[in-house]
Amino acid sequence: MNSDLLIQIYVFVLAVFVGFEVITKVPPTLHTPLMSGSNAISGITIVGALMAAGFTDLRLETLWGDLNITAVLGFLAIVFATINVVGGFMVTDRMLKMFKGK
């Protein structure tokens, strides 16, 4: 069990380094299409979060009764992914307005 956690942490750290290296190499003219692509990925995240919010197997007994941890975490994922999508489209729209003629 402990080695599985170490492998997951190792993969996460490698993904962070690779993602940082890839993003820093993107020229400024490609930031708008990259932002649109990341908005699409966040849309997929919302679909996965909706599926997680509907999962009802993991429960925790609390002061308020039976709390479904998976549904709470799925709801939080929906909220954060929605904020990411809306913010991404706002930034993309602002960047596209910079290219419009006056």
Image (cartoon, helix red, strand yellow):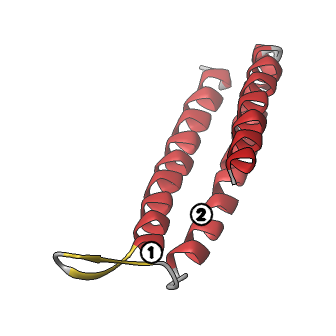
As shown in the figure, which amino acid type bears the numbered disc 2? Ile
Percent x, y of residue 20: 73, 21
Residue at mark 1: 71
Q: Tell me: 69 left or right of 24.
A: left
Q: Residue at x 57, y 41 (%)?
A: 88
Task: Locate residue 24: give its quadrant.
Answer: top right
Percent from the top left, x then y, of residue 64?
A: 18, 78
Circle 1: residue type: Ala
Quarter of the image holding residue 73?
bottom left
Q: Nearer the viewer, residue 46 or 65?
A: 65
Q: Is residue 24 above or below residue 75?
A: above
**Between disc 1 and disc 2, whose residue precedes?**
2
Which residue is under mark 2? Answer: 46
Q: Secondary structure at mark 1?
A: helix
Q: Give the image location of residue 43, x and y in percent.
A: 65, 59
Residue at coordinates 50% horizontally, 42% vertically from top-left?
Answer: 87
- Nearer to the camera, 17 or 97: 17
| Left or right of 63, for residue 47 | right
58 lies above or below 75: below
